[in-house]
Amino acid sequence: MNKMTVEEAREFYGADATEWLRRWDAGRIVWTIEMGGFGPGYEQCIHITCAEILRYMLAQNYIADLWKNDAGWKQVREDIETMSHKNPIIKTLGLSGAQWGAAMNLASQIYRHGPAKVMQDKRVKDRHIQVSHTFPVAA
């Protein structure tokens, strides 16, 4: 695949975290990164949690530049962990620690850098997947 222009990447992956979440909430398929490698159900839990964390981050309007120091990031992480214990969607998933960590990592990267930049990182080029908040089921 040829290298995308910035505009093409934004159209393909989403211009920012808000647009990525808007697509997710609308039931559209979004591009993301395979984080667990254990199959669709495991991945779905990670990406549902990622969307909920991202939703919270956007609502809190965090200043991501403050995350560069350990104290700033620690406070945000603790705040999000507290939220997750109260979030009815996340609570029903029964996440492992690895799933939580993967969701937190992905959400923070999408929040800080936007989905287009995250997806174009050469370290994840072989892990692109598509997900939707509506998990497919056999009829």
Image (tube, grey):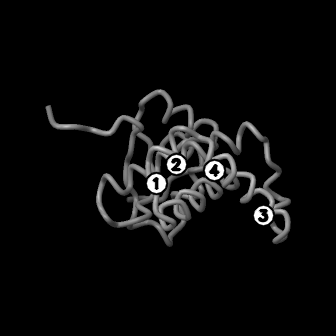
What is the three-letter code of the residue carrying label 2? Answer: Thr
Residues at marks 1 and 3 touching, judged by CB atoms closer than 8 Å: no
Q: Residues within 10 Å of mark 4 (few under 14, many from 20)?
A: many
> Marks 2 and 4: which is nearer the front?
2
- Residue bearing mark 1: 46
Residues at marks 2 and 1 touching, judged by CB atoms closer than 8 Å: yes
Helix, strand or loop at mark 4: loop
> Which of the two discs, 1 and 3, labels the residue nearer the N terminus?
1
Q: Residue furthest left?
A: 139
Helix, strand or loop at mark 2: helix
Q: Identify which residue is drawn at 40% across, 58% down.
A: 128
> Which of the two discs, 4 and 1, labels the residue nearer the N terminus?
1
Figure check: 120 above or below 49: below
- Residue bearing mark 4: 114
What is the three-letter code of the residue carrying label 3? Answer: Trp
> Which of the two discs, 3 and 2, labels the residue nearer the N terminus?
2
- Residue bearing mark 3: 73
Q: CA distance from mark 1 to mark 3?
A: 21 Å
Find residue 73 and report its image quarter. bottom right
- Residue bearing mark 2: 49
Q: Identify which residue is drawn at 42% across, 30% down.
A: 27
What is the three-letter code of the residue carrying label 4? Answer: Gly
Q: CA distance from mark 4 to mark 1?
A: 18 Å
